[in-house]
Amino acid sequence: MNFRDWATRVTLIFLMLAALILALLAGKSTQLQQNTATPSNSDIATWRQYPQIQIQSEINQGGKAQDIGNFPVITNQSSDRYITTQAFAKYKPKLEIAAVHPSNYGERYAQDMNGLPIKNQPIIVLHETSNSATSAVNFFQTPHTDENVQASYHAIIKLDGTVLYLVPPEKRAFGAANSVFDGAEGIETVQTNPKLPPSVNNFAYHVSLETPPDGRGNNFLKSHSGYTPEQYNSLAWLIAQSQVPEYRITTHKAVDRSSQRVDPLSFDFDKFLELLNTYRQVSPVYRAQK
């Protein structure tokens, strides 16, 4: 074989490999676009079941935490499962909003890693910060390239009852890594990344209570002094704006499969549910339709 023939064959092989690589990249790009495609009406309806943020431009602009005064909330429609009460209207917690670095949250996927549609109904997962709210926000505002380190909540309830909004509800906060929700029809979890274990993040709204001072700095505590009345009231007020039923409200400890998460410690679920039922009730229209 002369040099010209050899060079021609090498060139053809190179071109074939290049075409194959381009085809694989195009296929991966198409799958990514499908997973993060423009949300459908059903997707939007699902997101609306979470507590909503009316003013989201502050997050997108990357601003620091700030007081946003009397925050306008979305009024529940009469056809919804739940409507808010007069007690809800009278309670006025302080509201703040803070930026989270884009590396610490992502899109809610329409399909899992195998291309199967994701149809899970929303859940709410309760956490605690383990340190101060300021410390948590600083961590969420720090860029993280390691996917095993990335983390965020949708909201934090401070010790004084301030509701701090972090990640918009239509986005996927990285609140629980290896996790599964034990629902009425079996276990629920979604894997969107082959390098990471499945989790509930794609259909979860994560809200965290700021840990009291006596519970900070010790990962082996089994209890602490608990949460303030203001925290319980603000947590119930926030979740009263959702359409998520009680049986789909859970804790980080309950969904965790790493056997490392025990939060929120010393949480009084009965107290929380009593307040939640004070701030919202089943819509008469929904009750009549059942």
Image (cartoon, grey):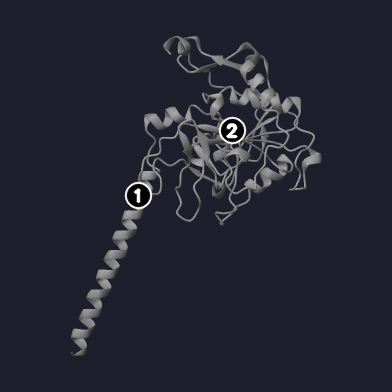
Q: Secondary structure at mark 2?
A: strand
- Across and down, in percent, residue 22 comes to 31, 62
Question: Which of 243 and 4 lies nearest the eye of the viewer?
Answer: 243
Task: State whether residue 156 is above or below residue 21.
Answer: above
Dividing the picture into quadrants, the one containing residue 62 is: top right
Q: Which residue is mark 1?
A: 31
Q: Secondary structure at mark 1?
A: helix
Residue at coordinates 40% horizontally, 39% vertically from top-left? 118
Question: Which of 282 and 96 lies nearest the eye of the viewer?
Answer: 282
Q: Is residue 276 visible?
A: yes
- Across and down, in percent, residue 260 comes to 65, 48
The three-letter amino acid code for the residue at tag 1 is Gln
Q: Which residue is mark 2?
A: 250
- Across and down, in percent, residue 158 comes to 71, 33
Q: Is residue 93 left or right of residue 215?
A: left
Residue at coordinates 28% horizontally, 64% vertically from top-left? 20
Dividing the picture into quadrants, the one containing residue 239 is: top right
Residues tagged 2 and 1 counted as in contact (Cβ below 8 A): no
Residue at coordinates 63% horizontally, 46% vertically from top-left? 140
Q: Is residue 193 left or right of residue 62?
A: left
Question: Which of 43 and 199 lies nearest the eye of the viewer?
Answer: 199
Q: Is residue 73 left or right of residue 275?
A: left
- Across and down, in percent, residue 108 comes to 46, 40
- Pick whichever of labels 2 and 1 is earlier in the sequence: 1
Quadrant of image for the C terminus: top left
